[in-house]
Image (cartoon, rainbow, N blue to C red):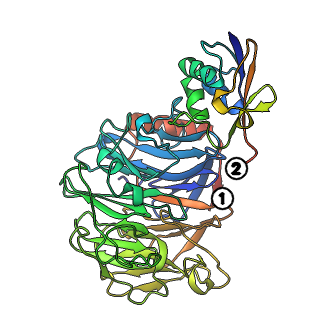
Protein backbone atom coordinates (compact mmCIF):
# COMPACT_ATOMS: atom_id res chain seq x y z
CA UNK A 1 0.00 0.00 0.00
CA UNK A 2 1.39 3.41 -0.94
CA UNK A 3 0.56 6.48 1.09
CA UNK A 4 1.93 10.04 0.96
CA UNK A 5 3.03 12.03 4.00
CA UNK A 6 2.87 15.81 3.59
CA UNK A 7 5.24 17.78 5.83
CA UNK A 8 5.22 21.40 7.06
CA UNK A 9 8.16 23.60 6.08
CA UNK A 10 9.91 23.29 9.45
CA UNK A 11 10.36 19.55 8.91
CA UNK A 12 11.70 19.71 5.34
CA UNK A 13 15.38 19.89 6.48
CA UNK A 14 14.89 16.61 8.34
CA UNK A 15 13.49 14.93 5.17
CA UNK A 16 16.29 15.83 2.77
CA UNK A 17 14.44 19.00 1.86
CA UNK A 18 11.29 17.22 0.71
CA UNK A 19 7.74 18.36 1.38
CA UNK A 20 6.05 15.11 0.33
CA UNK A 21 7.20 11.58 1.06
CA UNK A 22 5.75 8.54 -0.63
CA UNK A 23 5.88 5.50 1.64
CA UNK A 24 5.18 1.85 1.22
CA UNK A 25 3.49 1.02 4.52
CA UNK A 26 3.24 -2.57 5.62
CA UNK A 27 0.12 -2.00 7.69
CA UNK A 28 -3.03 -0.01 7.26
CA UNK A 29 -3.05 2.66 10.00
CA UNK A 30 -1.51 6.05 10.63
CA UNK A 31 0.79 4.43 13.19
CA UNK A 32 2.04 2.03 10.51
CA UNK A 33 2.72 4.95 8.21
CA UNK A 34 4.63 6.87 10.90
CA UNK A 35 6.58 3.71 11.76
CA UNK A 36 7.60 3.48 8.12
CA UNK A 37 8.52 7.17 8.17
CA UNK A 38 10.75 6.61 11.19
CA UNK A 39 12.88 4.14 9.27
CA UNK A 40 13.69 6.61 6.50
CA UNK A 41 13.44 9.92 8.32
CA UNK A 42 13.90 9.52 12.08
CA UNK A 43 14.45 13.28 12.45
CA UNK A 44 10.88 13.85 11.25
CA UNK A 45 9.38 11.08 13.32
CA UNK A 46 11.00 12.28 16.57
CA UNK A 47 9.64 15.77 16.02
CA UNK A 48 6.10 14.48 15.49
CA UNK A 49 5.93 11.75 18.16
CA UNK A 50 7.10 11.71 21.79
CA UNK A 51 9.29 8.99 23.25
CA UNK A 52 6.07 7.24 24.18
CA UNK A 53 4.92 7.11 20.58
CA UNK A 54 2.18 9.71 21.04
CA UNK A 55 1.58 12.65 18.73
CA UNK A 56 3.09 15.76 20.35
CA UNK A 57 0.46 17.99 21.98
CA UNK A 58 0.76 20.84 19.49
CA UNK A 59 0.99 18.76 16.33
CA UNK A 60 -2.03 17.77 14.27
CA UNK A 61 -2.12 14.81 11.92
CA UNK A 62 -4.80 14.65 9.27
CA UNK A 63 -5.89 11.85 6.98
CA UNK A 64 -7.31 13.75 4.09
CA UNK A 65 -9.23 16.53 5.84
CA UNK A 66 -9.93 14.64 9.07
CA UNK A 67 -7.86 15.30 12.20
CA UNK A 68 -7.02 11.89 13.66
CA UNK A 69 -7.75 13.25 17.16
CA UNK A 70 -11.42 13.07 16.16
CA UNK A 71 -11.24 9.67 14.51
CA UNK A 72 -9.27 6.73 15.87
CA UNK A 73 -6.01 8.52 16.66
CA UNK A 74 -2.96 6.64 15.45
CA UNK A 75 -5.21 3.65 14.76
CA UNK A 76 -7.08 5.62 12.10
CA UNK A 77 -7.21 3.40 9.01
CA UNK A 78 -5.53 4.28 5.73
CA UNK A 79 -6.33 3.20 2.20
CA UNK A 80 -4.00 2.80 -0.72
CA UNK A 81 -3.31 6.34 -1.92
CA UNK A 82 -4.20 8.04 1.40
CA UNK A 83 -2.54 11.35 2.19
CA UNK A 84 -1.31 11.91 5.77
CA UNK A 85 -0.83 15.63 6.43
CA UNK A 86 1.27 16.81 9.40
CA UNK A 87 0.74 20.38 10.56
CA UNK A 88 1.59 22.46 13.64
CA UNK A 89 -1.48 23.41 15.69
CA UNK A 90 -2.69 26.97 16.07
CA UNK A 91 -0.81 27.62 19.31
CA UNK A 92 2.53 28.85 20.56
CA UNK A 93 3.55 32.48 20.20
CA UNK B 1 44.36 35.85 28.99
CA UNK B 2 46.17 38.45 26.89
CA UNK B 3 44.95 41.99 27.46
CA UNK B 4 44.56 42.39 23.70
CA UNK B 5 41.84 39.76 23.58
CA UNK B 6 38.94 41.68 22.01
CA UNK B 7 35.98 39.90 23.58
CA UNK B 8 36.90 38.33 26.88
CA UNK B 9 33.39 38.22 28.33
CA UNK B 10 30.56 36.33 26.72
CA UNK B 11 27.04 36.38 28.08
CA UNK B 12 24.74 33.56 27.06
CA UNK B 13 21.19 34.87 27.21
CA UNK B 14 18.27 32.51 26.75
CA UNK B 15 14.76 33.85 26.24
CA UNK B 16 11.32 32.48 25.54
CA UNK B 17 11.79 33.33 21.86
CA UNK B 18 15.41 32.48 21.14
CA UNK B 19 18.98 32.91 22.36
CA UNK B 20 21.35 35.88 22.23
CA UNK B 21 25.09 36.18 22.71
CA UNK B 22 26.33 39.38 24.31
CA UNK B 23 30.04 40.06 23.86
CA UNK B 24 31.91 42.50 26.08
CA UNK B 25 35.41 43.96 25.96
CA UNK B 26 37.89 43.34 28.73
CA UNK B 27 36.94 46.52 30.56
CA UNK B 28 33.30 45.43 30.28
CA UNK B 29 32.41 48.91 29.04
CA UNK B 30 31.43 48.03 25.48
CA UNK B 31 28.93 45.31 24.60
CA UNK B 32 27.46 43.96 21.41
CA UNK B 33 24.34 41.88 20.93
CA UNK B 34 24.30 38.97 18.52
CA UNK B 35 21.18 36.98 17.67
CA UNK B 36 18.55 35.81 17.95
CA UNK B 37 19.72 32.27 17.53
CA UNK B 38 16.96 29.65 17.26
CA UNK B 39 14.24 32.31 16.77
CA UNK B 40 10.85 31.17 18.00
CA UNK B 41 12.31 28.54 20.31
CA UNK B 42 12.30 28.70 24.09
CA UNK B 43 15.87 28.52 25.40
CA UNK B 44 15.76 27.76 29.12
CA UNK B 45 19.28 26.35 29.44
CA UNK B 46 22.64 27.48 28.11
CA UNK B 47 26.22 26.79 29.20
CA UNK B 48 29.84 27.37 28.32
CA UNK B 49 32.26 24.47 28.63
CA UNK B 50 35.93 25.45 28.52
CA UNK B 51 37.31 22.16 29.84
CA UNK B 52 39.75 19.97 27.98
CA UNK B 53 40.76 22.66 25.47
CA UNK B 54 37.17 23.18 24.27
CA UNK B 55 35.40 26.48 23.74
CA UNK B 56 31.95 24.97 23.47
CA UNK B 57 28.58 26.61 23.90
CA UNK B 58 25.47 24.61 24.70
CA UNK B 59 21.90 25.71 24.08
CA UNK B 60 18.81 23.65 24.79
CA UNK B 61 15.95 24.66 22.53
CA UNK B 62 12.31 23.86 22.99
CA UNK B 63 10.17 24.14 19.92
CA UNK B 64 6.56 24.48 21.06
CA UNK B 65 5.51 22.06 18.35
CA UNK B 66 8.42 19.74 17.64
CA UNK B 67 10.13 19.15 20.98
CA UNK B 68 13.46 19.70 22.68
CA UNK B 69 16.99 19.44 21.26
CA UNK B 70 20.46 20.16 22.64
CA UNK B 71 22.69 22.19 20.29
CA UNK B 72 26.40 22.95 20.53
CA UNK B 73 28.72 25.50 19.00
CA UNK B 74 32.51 25.15 18.93
CA UNK B 75 33.11 28.56 17.35
CA UNK B 76 31.45 30.75 19.98
CA UNK B 77 28.14 30.96 18.18
CA UNK B 78 29.13 31.40 14.53
CA UNK B 79 27.58 28.01 13.79
CA UNK B 80 25.47 25.57 15.78
CA UNK B 81 24.78 21.87 15.43
CA UNK B 82 21.22 20.86 14.56
CA UNK B 83 20.87 17.17 15.44
CA UNK B 84 18.49 15.43 13.09
CA UNK B 85 17.40 13.15 15.89
CA UNK B 86 16.75 14.68 19.31
CA UNK B 87 19.81 13.76 21.35
CA UNK B 88 18.25 13.72 24.81
CA UNK B 89 15.46 11.20 25.14
CA UNK B 90 13.89 9.05 27.80
CA UNK B 91 13.87 5.34 27.18
CA UNK B 92 10.45 4.18 26.02
CA UNK B 93 10.23 1.86 29.03
CA UNK B 94 10.37 4.84 31.42
CA UNK B 95 6.90 5.99 30.43
CA UNK B 96 8.27 9.57 30.32
CA UNK B 97 8.59 12.09 27.52
CA UNK B 98 11.08 14.97 27.62
CA UNK B 99 9.46 18.38 27.85
CA UNK B 100 12.29 20.82 28.64
CA UNK B 101 15.98 20.94 29.50
CA UNK B 102 16.35 23.29 32.47
CA UNK B 103 20.02 23.02 33.29
CA UNK B 104 23.29 22.16 31.53
CA UNK B 105 26.10 21.48 33.99
CA UNK B 106 29.66 20.69 32.88
CA UNK B 107 31.30 18.23 35.26
CA UNK B 108 34.50 18.67 37.25
CA UNK B 109 37.71 19.88 35.56
CA UNK B 110 39.24 16.47 36.17
CA UNK B 111 36.54 14.80 34.04
CA UNK B 112 36.19 16.97 30.91
CA UNK B 113 34.02 14.40 29.14
CA UNK B 114 31.39 14.39 31.88
CA UNK B 115 28.30 16.61 31.89
CA UNK B 116 24.84 16.60 33.41
CA UNK B 117 21.45 17.89 32.35
CA UNK B 118 18.50 18.66 34.58
CA UNK B 119 15.20 18.20 32.78
CA UNK B 120 11.41 18.24 32.98
CA UNK B 121 9.84 15.89 33.96
CA UNK B 122 12.29 15.72 36.86
CA UNK B 123 15.30 13.67 35.88
CA UNK B 124 19.05 13.90 35.64
CA UNK B 125 20.80 12.97 32.40
CA UNK B 126 24.50 12.23 32.31
CA UNK B 127 27.02 12.15 29.48
CA UNK B 128 30.46 10.59 29.83
CA UNK B 129 31.50 11.25 26.23
CA UNK B 130 31.53 15.03 26.05
CA UNK B 131 27.83 15.34 25.30
CA UNK B 132 27.65 12.90 22.39
CA UNK B 133 25.24 10.58 24.20
CA UNK B 134 23.05 11.01 27.27
CA UNK B 135 21.58 8.54 29.75
CA UNK B 136 18.93 9.20 32.38
CA UNK B 137 20.12 8.55 35.94
CA UNK B 138 18.40 5.35 37.02
CA UNK B 139 18.59 6.04 40.75
CA UNK B 140 16.44 9.16 40.45
CA UNK B 141 14.24 7.71 37.72
CA UNK B 142 13.17 4.83 39.94
CA UNK B 143 13.28 6.72 43.24
CA UNK B 144 10.38 5.68 45.48
CA UNK B 145 9.54 9.35 46.13
CA UNK B 146 8.98 10.05 42.42
CA UNK B 147 5.28 9.29 42.40
CA UNK B 148 4.75 11.88 45.15
CA UNK B 149 6.71 14.71 43.54
CA UNK B 150 4.23 17.27 42.24
CA UNK B 151 4.76 19.99 39.64
CA UNK B 152 5.22 23.61 40.66
CA UNK B 153 4.14 26.56 38.55
CA UNK B 154 7.15 26.08 36.28
CA UNK B 155 6.51 22.37 35.86
CA UNK B 156 7.96 19.26 37.48
CA UNK B 157 11.58 20.04 36.79
CA UNK B 158 15.06 19.26 38.02
CA UNK B 159 16.70 22.68 37.60
CA UNK B 160 19.81 22.66 39.77
CA UNK B 161 22.90 20.44 39.78
CA UNK B 162 25.75 20.96 42.23
CA UNK B 163 28.76 18.68 41.71
CA UNK B 164 31.34 18.24 44.45
CA UNK B 165 34.25 20.43 43.40
CA UNK B 166 36.60 18.45 45.61
CA UNK B 167 36.28 15.57 43.16
CA UNK B 168 34.35 13.21 45.41
CA UNK B 169 31.50 11.18 43.99
CA UNK B 170 28.96 13.41 45.72
CA UNK B 171 26.29 15.15 43.68
CA UNK B 172 23.38 17.32 44.76
CA UNK B 173 20.30 18.20 42.75
CA UNK B 174 17.22 20.32 43.41
CA UNK B 175 13.80 20.22 41.88
CA UNK B 176 10.47 21.96 41.90
CA UNK B 177 8.56 20.55 43.59
CA UNK B 178 10.49 17.76 45.22
CA UNK B 179 13.28 19.47 47.14
CA UNK B 180 16.97 18.72 47.47
CA UNK B 181 18.40 15.24 46.89
CA UNK B 182 21.99 14.14 47.37
CA UNK B 183 23.95 11.15 46.16
CA UNK B 184 27.15 10.09 47.91
CA UNK B 185 27.93 7.27 45.50
CA UNK B 186 28.21 8.87 42.11
CA UNK B 187 24.48 8.92 41.44
CA UNK B 188 23.58 5.33 42.22
CA UNK B 189 21.39 6.18 45.22
CA UNK B 190 19.74 9.39 46.39
CA UNK B 191 18.48 10.70 49.72
CA UNK B 192 16.22 13.71 50.35
CA UNK B 193 18.18 16.49 52.11
CA UNK B 194 15.63 19.06 53.25
CA UNK B 195 15.86 19.17 57.06
CA UNK B 196 15.13 22.75 58.09
CA UNK B 197 13.65 23.87 54.75
CA UNK B 198 10.00 24.89 55.02
CA UNK B 199 7.18 23.98 52.66
CA UNK B 200 4.71 26.82 53.25
CA UNK B 201 2.19 25.34 50.84
CA UNK B 202 1.82 21.97 52.60
CA UNK B 203 -0.03 21.10 55.83
CA UNK B 204 3.22 19.62 57.18
CA UNK B 205 5.67 22.54 56.94
CA UNK B 206 8.74 20.31 57.37
CA UNK B 207 8.21 17.19 55.26
CA UNK B 208 11.09 14.89 54.33
CA UNK B 209 10.68 16.03 50.71
CA UNK B 210 8.27 18.06 48.59
CA UNK B 211 9.81 21.48 49.22
CA UNK B 212 9.76 23.90 46.30
CA UNK B 213 13.44 24.75 46.06
CA UNK B 214 14.19 27.42 43.46
CA UNK B 215 18.01 27.45 43.36
CA UNK B 216 21.07 26.15 45.21
CA UNK B 217 24.62 27.50 44.77
CA UNK B 218 28.00 26.52 46.17
CA UNK B 219 31.53 27.89 45.92
CA UNK B 220 34.15 25.45 44.63
CA UNK B 221 36.60 26.46 47.37
CA UNK B 222 34.09 25.55 50.10
CA UNK B 223 32.55 22.19 49.17
CA UNK B 224 29.74 21.33 51.51
CA UNK B 225 28.61 24.89 52.11
CA UNK B 226 25.42 25.54 50.18
CA UNK B 227 23.09 28.50 49.81
CA UNK B 228 19.44 27.92 48.93
CA UNK B 229 16.70 30.20 47.62
CA UNK B 230 13.40 28.56 48.44
CA UNK B 231 9.80 29.24 47.51
CA UNK B 232 9.69 31.36 50.68
CA UNK B 233 12.93 31.03 52.55
CA UNK B 234 16.66 31.66 52.34
CA UNK B 235 18.90 28.99 53.79
CA UNK B 236 22.50 27.91 54.25
CA UNK B 237 23.91 24.48 54.87
CA UNK B 238 27.44 23.78 56.07
CA UNK B 239 27.15 20.00 55.85
CA UNK B 240 26.25 19.27 52.22
CA UNK B 241 22.55 19.69 52.88
CA UNK B 242 22.19 17.44 55.93
CA UNK B 243 20.76 20.45 57.77
CA UNK B 244 19.71 23.93 56.71
CA UNK B 245 19.63 27.21 58.67
CA UNK B 246 17.49 30.27 57.93
CA UNK B 247 19.63 33.19 56.70
CA UNK B 248 16.89 35.64 55.67
CA UNK B 249 18.48 38.44 57.69
CA UNK B 250 17.57 41.89 56.45
CA UNK B 251 15.92 41.06 53.14
CA UNK B 252 12.60 42.68 52.19
CA UNK B 253 11.22 39.28 51.22
CA UNK B 254 12.62 35.78 51.38
CA UNK B 255 10.67 34.81 48.27
CA UNK B 256 12.62 34.76 45.02
CA UNK B 257 14.15 32.61 42.34
CA UNK B 258 17.60 33.77 41.32
CA UNK B 259 20.80 33.16 43.29
CA UNK B 260 24.42 33.43 42.21
CA UNK B 261 27.79 32.88 43.86
CA UNK B 262 30.66 35.37 43.81
CA UNK B 263 33.49 33.78 41.81
CA UNK B 264 36.24 34.47 44.35
CA UNK B 265 34.56 35.06 47.73
CA UNK B 266 32.92 31.94 49.18
CA UNK B 267 30.83 33.99 51.63
CA UNK B 268 29.43 36.34 48.98
CA UNK B 269 26.10 35.53 47.35
CA UNK B 270 23.65 37.53 45.22
CA UNK B 271 19.85 37.26 45.14
CA UNK B 272 16.92 39.25 43.75
CA UNK B 273 14.04 39.09 46.25
CA UNK B 274 10.48 39.23 44.93
CA UNK B 275 7.42 40.53 46.75
CA UNK B 276 5.54 37.24 47.12
CA UNK B 277 4.45 34.09 45.35
CA UNK B 278 1.28 35.90 44.31
CA UNK B 279 2.96 39.18 43.23
CA UNK B 280 6.19 38.07 41.64
CA UNK B 281 7.73 41.51 41.22
CA UNK B 282 10.56 43.20 43.12
CA UNK B 283 9.35 44.75 46.42
CA UNK B 284 8.19 48.35 46.19
CA UNK B 285 8.79 48.35 42.41
CA UNK B 286 12.48 49.05 43.20
CA UNK B 287 14.86 46.83 41.28
CA UNK B 288 17.55 45.77 43.76
CA UNK B 289 20.06 42.98 43.91
CA UNK B 290 20.84 41.93 47.48
CA UNK B 291 24.31 40.78 48.42
CA UNK B 292 25.68 39.08 51.48
CA UNK B 293 29.42 39.08 52.13
CA UNK B 294 29.19 37.13 55.38
CA UNK B 295 27.43 33.95 54.30
CA UNK B 296 23.96 35.25 55.03
CA UNK B 297 24.46 36.94 58.43
CA UNK B 298 23.29 40.13 56.74
CA UNK B 299 22.23 41.29 53.25
CA UNK B 300 22.68 44.69 51.62
CA UNK B 301 20.70 46.14 48.70
CA UNK B 302 22.66 47.07 45.58
CA UNK B 303 20.68 49.63 43.61
CA UNK B 304 23.03 52.20 42.04
CA UNK B 305 22.13 52.40 38.37
CA UNK B 306 19.00 50.25 38.69
CA UNK B 307 15.47 51.72 38.33
CA UNK B 308 14.07 52.61 41.75
CA UNK B 309 10.50 53.48 40.80
CA UNK B 310 7.82 51.81 38.72
CA UNK B 311 10.06 48.80 38.14
CA UNK B 312 7.65 45.88 38.18
CA UNK B 313 10.38 43.44 37.33
CA UNK B 314 11.11 39.84 38.13
CA UNK B 315 14.24 37.75 37.69
CA UNK B 316 13.94 34.00 37.21
CA UNK B 317 16.01 31.22 38.72
CA UNK B 318 18.81 31.07 36.13
CA UNK B 319 18.79 34.67 34.99
CA UNK B 320 21.47 35.90 37.46
CA UNK B 321 25.14 35.09 36.91
CA UNK B 322 28.70 36.13 37.70
CA UNK B 323 31.81 36.05 35.54
CA UNK B 324 35.26 34.97 36.76
CA UNK B 325 37.11 38.29 36.43
CA UNK B 326 38.34 40.50 39.26
CA UNK B 327 36.45 42.57 40.24
CA UNK B 328 33.63 40.21 39.51
CA UNK B 329 31.05 40.98 36.88
CA UNK B 330 27.44 40.34 37.85
CA UNK B 331 24.65 40.08 35.28
CA UNK B 332 20.92 39.52 35.28
CA UNK B 333 18.00 39.53 32.89
CA UNK B 334 14.37 40.30 33.60
CA UNK B 335 11.12 38.83 32.42
CA UNK B 336 10.53 42.17 30.71
CA UNK B 337 13.59 41.61 28.51
CA UNK B 338 16.12 43.95 30.11
CA UNK B 339 19.72 42.87 30.59
CA UNK B 340 21.74 44.53 33.37
CA UNK B 341 25.45 44.32 34.19
CA UNK B 342 27.77 45.32 37.01
CA UNK B 343 31.54 45.32 36.54
CA UNK B 344 32.29 46.10 40.18
CA UNK B 345 30.81 43.11 41.98
CA UNK B 346 27.36 44.68 42.23
CA UNK B 347 28.26 48.15 43.53
CA UNK B 348 26.90 49.83 40.40
CA UNK B 349 24.85 48.74 37.42
CA UNK B 350 23.92 49.68 33.90
CA UNK B 351 21.31 48.38 31.51
CA UNK B 352 23.05 46.79 28.54
CA UNK B 353 20.02 46.01 26.40
CA UNK B 354 16.24 46.21 26.62
CA UNK B 355 13.40 45.07 24.48
CA UNK B 356 14.54 41.46 24.40
CA UNK B 357 11.98 38.69 24.80
CA UNK B 358 11.42 37.47 28.38
CA UNK B 359 14.84 36.41 29.69
CA UNK B 360 14.96 33.02 31.40
CA UNK B 361 18.68 32.27 31.57
CA UNK B 362 21.90 34.29 31.75
CA UNK B 363 25.30 32.62 31.93
CA UNK B 364 28.63 34.44 31.91
CA UNK B 365 31.81 33.02 30.42
CA UNK B 366 35.35 34.18 29.91
CA UNK B 367 36.37 31.98 26.98
CA UNK B 368 39.99 31.06 26.55
CA UNK B 369 41.69 32.71 23.56
CA UNK B 370 41.24 31.00 20.22
CA UNK B 371 44.21 29.06 18.87
CA UNK B 372 46.62 31.42 17.08
CA UNK B 373 45.79 30.29 13.53
CA UNK B 374 42.09 30.60 14.06
CA UNK B 375 42.60 34.05 15.56
CA UNK B 376 44.42 35.28 12.44
CA UNK B 377 41.64 33.91 10.24
CA UNK B 378 39.01 35.50 12.42
CA UNK B 379 40.81 38.84 12.26
CA UNK B 380 40.91 38.65 8.47
CA UNK B 381 37.21 37.82 8.39
CA UNK B 382 36.44 40.70 10.70
CA UNK B 383 38.32 43.14 8.42
CA UNK B 384 36.22 41.95 5.48
CA UNK B 385 32.85 41.66 7.20
CA UNK B 386 30.69 44.63 8.20
CA UNK B 387 29.80 44.87 11.90
CA UNK B 388 26.42 43.40 12.82
CA UNK B 389 24.19 43.43 15.83
CA UNK B 390 23.47 46.15 18.37
CA UNK B 391 26.03 47.84 20.60
CA UNK B 392 25.66 49.23 24.08
Residue bearing mark 1: B357
Name above or below for residue B119 compared with residue A29: below
Horizontal side of residue B50 vs A9, given as left or right: left
Say what secondary structure mark 2 lies in: loop
Q: Position of residue B109 (x, y in %)?
A: 26, 49
Name above or below for residue B204 compared with residue A69: below
Say what secondary structure mark 1 lies in: loop
Q: Residue B94, labelled with which disc?
A: none
Q: CA distance from mark 1 to mark 2?
A: 14 Å
**Which residue lies at the image location 28% right of the left edge and 43% below the top edge?**
B112
Mark 2 neighbour density, 10 Å: few (under 14) some (14–19) many (20 or more): few
Q: Position of residue B53 (x, y in %)?
A: 32, 41
Q: Are marks 1 and 2 in contact (CB under 8 Å)?
A: no
Residue B261 in sight: yes
Q: Residue furthest right?
A: A65
Q: Position of residue B180 (x, y in %)?
A: 34, 64
**Which residue lies at the image location 61% right of the left edge and 24% below the top edge?**
A34
Q: Residue furthest bottom?
A: B250
Query: What chain does badge 1 belong to?
Result: B
Horizontal side of residue B129 vs A41, given as left or right: left
Residue bearing mark 2: A92
> Residue B200 lies in what quarter of the image?
bottom left
Residue B328 in sight: no
**Which residue lies at the image location 62% right of the left edge and 80% below the top edge?**
B307
Q: Which one is in front, B318 or B20?
A: B318
Mark 1 neighbour density, 10 Å: few (under 14) some (14–19) many (20 or more): some
Q: Position of residue A28 (x, y in %)?
A: 65, 17
Amino acid sequence: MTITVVLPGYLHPYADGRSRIALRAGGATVRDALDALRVSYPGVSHRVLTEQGEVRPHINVFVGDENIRFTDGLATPLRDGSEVVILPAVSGG
Amino acid sequence: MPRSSPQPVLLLVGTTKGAFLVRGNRARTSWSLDGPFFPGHQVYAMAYDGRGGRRRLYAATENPFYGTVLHTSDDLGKSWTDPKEPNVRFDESSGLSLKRIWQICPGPESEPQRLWLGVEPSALFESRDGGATWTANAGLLTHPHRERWTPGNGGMCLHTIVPDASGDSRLLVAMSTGGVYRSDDGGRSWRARNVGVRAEFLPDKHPEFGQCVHKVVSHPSRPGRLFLQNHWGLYRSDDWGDTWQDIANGVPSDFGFAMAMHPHEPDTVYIVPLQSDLFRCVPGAKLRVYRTRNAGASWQPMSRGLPQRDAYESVLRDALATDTLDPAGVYFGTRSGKLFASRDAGASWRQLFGGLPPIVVVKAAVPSPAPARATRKAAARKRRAPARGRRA
